[in-house]
Amino acid sequence: MTKAYSLNLTVLAVALGTDSLGTTHPIDLPTMSARRPLNPTVSLQICRFTILAFSTLNGSETRAQSSEGTSRYIAPMDIPVELSGNFMEPRSDHFHSGLDIRTQGREGIPVKAVADGWVSRIKISPWGYGKAVYIDHADGHTTVYGHLQQLTGRVGEACLDHQYRQKDFSIDWTPEKGALSLKQGEVFALSGNTGGSGGPHLHFEVRRTGDQMALDPEVHGFAVPDRVPPEIHGVRLYPLTDSSRCAPYPEKAVGYAAHGASGQYTLKVTPMAFGTVGLAVNTFDRYDNGGAKCGVRMIEVFVDSIRHFSTTLDHVDFNLNRYCNAHMDYGLSKAQKMDYHRCFRQPNNKLRIYGKEPKEGLS
């Protein structure tokens, strides 16, 4: 099952009033539980927001399964699975498409096929995934292994032969189907730090072979211990119409700071706004065996027990991946590395990760 943790906020004690000179002023009002007029020029809405930030699958409590219902994949290395990055973790201009598995700070760890299959692609480049191998499996999935130090055995020999024939180090080769078959557990490479890697690790993906959509590897048998609740560090509000207004954040702040731990958080300052506003939450997750900041899998926003927004981060469409910048607060992500997820859709955001809630924003 998926773990859920909530941030309960009493948000919107807000009104804008107009004085005799026609100037609009924010009015800080006492917390109430219903909408009521104060005078002809002041409106009030008090809502209780509940934000649910869902973590990744709990490996100690969940038997991960493949799409056919039976877990068949083994771990790609014979070392404990410890992550430095997880699936759909927000990165610069994209969502991360796989798992970054630590290799104990070293290179040269044998990399195995996680299931029976055949090598469908070998790409060697000084950039990106560096030395990478793609293996197709009979269940309709492709697994990807990136930043390899070197390819070994029959796969390594075939790769070297193709490089000589092409007279080029950099290749993007699609071997004939079945020409380089592998059995589950068969070693075909050593882990490394090639391409655009910032340190020794194995980049591992599971894709749907038909359309190359990246899927969550943790759903396919890679149980990573995760009893740590997601962390929620702040909330932001955004005016969504010309008449909407949001009060300034506390001095020098870029949002309303959340305080708490173990899945229960509150805000010290009551946010104020008027009209239809959007909400964003700064949230991320950590795993039991590593302190790396990783992504959450689902976010839901409820207003008075009614769900107004949901997003499920369960696939990466490489054709749309750059729209990550529309989902995240791009400015804060770039400038301050803050993971503010927008809980509303920006115009022309084509990501298909959102629920069917018809209403945009909160009002």
Image: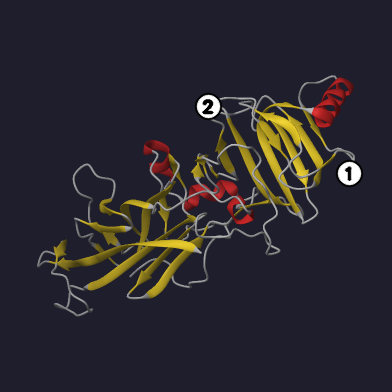
The residue at 80%/46% (across/down) is 117
Q: Amino acid at mark 1?
A: Gly
Give the image's coloring scheme: secondary structure
Q: Quadrant of the C terminus?
A: bottom left
> Mark 2 or mark 1, which has the lower sequence index?
2
* Left or right of 63, for residue 46: left
Q: Does residue 130 sit above or below 37 in this rendering? A: above
Quick check: 298 left or right of 162? left
The answer to which of 266 and 82 lies nearer the viewer is: 82
Q: Residue at x 64, y 37 (%)?
A: 77
Q: Is residue 307 visible?
A: yes
Q: Residue 242: horizontal and vertical position, in percent? A: 34, 62
From the top left corner, tell me how far across and down residue 57 is, in percent: 51, 57
Residue 28 vertical position relative to residue 126 in the rendered view, above or below: below
- Left/right placement of residue 2 relative to residue 146 reads left
Q: Closest to the observer: 301 or 321?
A: 301
Residue 357, given in percent of the width and then of the height, sits at 48, 72
State the SS at label 1. loop
According to the image, label 2 marks what residue?
105
Instruction: Report whether residue 130 is seen.
Output: no
Distance Cα–Cα, label 2 vs label 1: 34 Å
* Three-letter amino acid code at the position of disc 2: Gly
Q: Identify the image quadrant of residue 188.
A: top right
Residue at the extreme left of the image, as rendered = 20
Q: Callout 1: 10 Å neighbours few (<14), some, many (20+)? A: few
Give the residue number, with chain letter if any, for mark 1: 178
